[in-house]
Amino acid sequence: MHLLTEFQVAIKSAVTSEADPTLIERIEAQ
């Protein structure tokens, strides 16, 4: 669970840099 959380945070940071609201919403939904 902890590893998954860090993974999501890393993705969110990368996605935010790419400015992809769709992926951000999908990550938030999980």
Image (cartoon, rainbow, N blue to C red):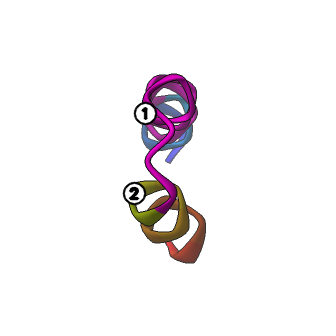
The secondary structure that dominates the magenta segment is helix
Q: Which residues are magenta?
A: 7-21
- Residue topped by disc 1: 11
Residue 29 % position (x, y): 54, 77
- The image quadrant that residue 22 belongs to is bottom left
- Circle 2: residue type: Leu
Q: Nearer the viewer, residue 6 or 13?
A: 13
Relative horizontal placement of residue 12, taking residue 3 as reference (left or right): right
Question: Which tag is nearer the camera, tag 2 or tag 1?
Answer: 2
On screen, 1 above or below 17? below
Q: Earlier in the sequence, mark 2 or mark 1?
A: 1
Instruction: Specify whether residue 12 is painted magenta.
Output: yes
**Secondary structure found at label 2:** helix
Residue 11 % position (x, y): 43, 33
**Secondary structure found at label 1:** helix
Question: Could you tell me how far apart the alpha carbons at marks 2 and 1 are, in whole angstroms?
Answer: 9 Å
- Count neighbours of disc 1 (C-alpha within 10 A) and say few if under 14, some if 14 to 19, many if 20 or more: some
Q: Nearer the viewer, residue 2 or 28?
A: 28
- Circle 1: residue type: Ile
Residue 6 % position (x, y): 54, 29
For the point 56% across and 33% down, the residue is 16
For the point 43% across and 42% down, the residue is 4
For the point 49% across and 72% down, the residue is 30
For the point 39% across and 57% down, the residue is 23
- Residue topped by disc 2: 23
On screen, 10 above or below 5? above
On screen, 16 above or below 20? above
- The image quadrant that residue 2 belongs to is top right
* Callouts 2 and 1 close, C-beta under 8 Å: yes
On screen, 25 above or below 29? above
